Image: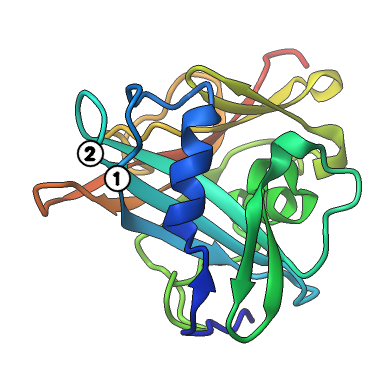
């Protein structure tokens, strides 16, 4: 179980993301600095209790129009072995835990493993702010014939429409919906070829609540 520490962060998560988001190919803001606000998200627990994992939703009102982005983050007490520079979002000083290395979770095998476990229903999403409290707003499904691929088999690639983690020999792709779109979630028909999903809620700038897909798992027919 992850323990949520209510303490200081220097820089804050939003300050780190204000610098990092414009470097992503899926960011839709203009030339100006993002104007970010927290809009939702959830956490996952590391079975080993070492890595913090959070799926952050941020709303940006600094571009041509309001947008909401999904940013999975991992928090580590030491650099992630084998991670390239592109995976590192930045470092921060945590008031309780000290120096933390913050990574784009799509490049962290611990987060990818737990996301796949969530899709398969083997773990529960946790509240973003409270320790040991499940997040009931997060939905998931899995209709595949076997287990999802191992994180080591997946390669993360940022694209204009999001991030894809693909395993060509398995014919499987895990897609992170970075630019969130209100619309279908678990109860509605999912896109063709989808064998699993994670969906949830976030806040819109006008104060209303939206639901939509956070991640989808796709398997190529005949793979």
In this rendering, the answer to whether 142 lies above or below 9 is: above
Identity of the residue furthest to the top in this view: 222
Q: What coloring was used for the rendering?
A: rainbow
Look at the image and tell me whether residue 198 can be seen. Answer: no
Residue 188 sits in quarter: top left
Q: Whole-percent x and y of residue 94?
A: 60, 76
User: Which label belongs to residue 61?
Assistant: 2
Relative horizontal placement of residue 115, taking residue 205 as reference (left or right): right
Look at the image and tell me whether residue 222 can be seen. Answer: yes
- Which one is closest to the eye, mark 1 or mark 2? 2
User: Toward the viewer: 204 or 149?
Assistant: 204
Relative horizontal placement of residue 40, taking residue 163 as reference (left or right): left
How dense is the environment of label 2, judged by Cα within 10 Å: few (below 14), some, or many (20 and up)? some
What residue is at 62 percent from the left and 65 percent from the top? Answer: 92
Residue under numbered circle 1? 59
Residue 176 sits in quarter: top right
Determine contact: label 1, label 2, CB under 8 Å: yes
In this rendering, the answer to whether 208 lies above or below 168 is: below
Identity of the residue furthest to the right in this view: 82
What residue is at 75 percent from the left and 77 percent from the top? Answer: 49
What residue is at 49 percent from the left and 79 percent from the top? Answer: 8
């Amino acid at each position: 179980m992850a323990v949520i520490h209510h303490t200081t962060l220097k820089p804050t998560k939003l300050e780190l993301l204000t610098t990092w988001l414009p470097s992503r190919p899926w960011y839709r803001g203009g030339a100006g600095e993002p104007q970010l606000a927290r809009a939702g998200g959830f956490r996952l627990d590391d079975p080993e209790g070492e890595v913090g994992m959070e799926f952050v939703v941020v709303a940006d009102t600094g571009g041509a129009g309001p947008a909401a982005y999904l940013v999975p983050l991992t928090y580590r007490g030491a650099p992630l072995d084998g991670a390239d520079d592109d995976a590192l979002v930045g470092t921060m000083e945590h008031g309780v835990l000290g120096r933390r290395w913050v990574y784009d979770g799509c490049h962290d095998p611990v987060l990818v493993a737990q996301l796949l476990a969530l899709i398969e229903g083997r773990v529960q999403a946790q509240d973003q702010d409270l320790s040991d409290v499940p997040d009931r707003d997060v939905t998931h499904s899995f209709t595949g014939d076997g287990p999802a691929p191992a994180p080591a088999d997946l390669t993360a690639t940022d694209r204009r429409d999001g991030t894809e983690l693909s395993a060509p020999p398995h014919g499987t792709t895990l897609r992170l919906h970075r630019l969130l779109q209100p619309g279908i979630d678990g109860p509605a028909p999912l896109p063709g070829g989808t064998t699993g999903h994670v969906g949830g809620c976030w806040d819109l700038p006008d104060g209303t609540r939206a639901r939509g897909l956070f991640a989808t798992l796709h398997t190529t027919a005949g793979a």
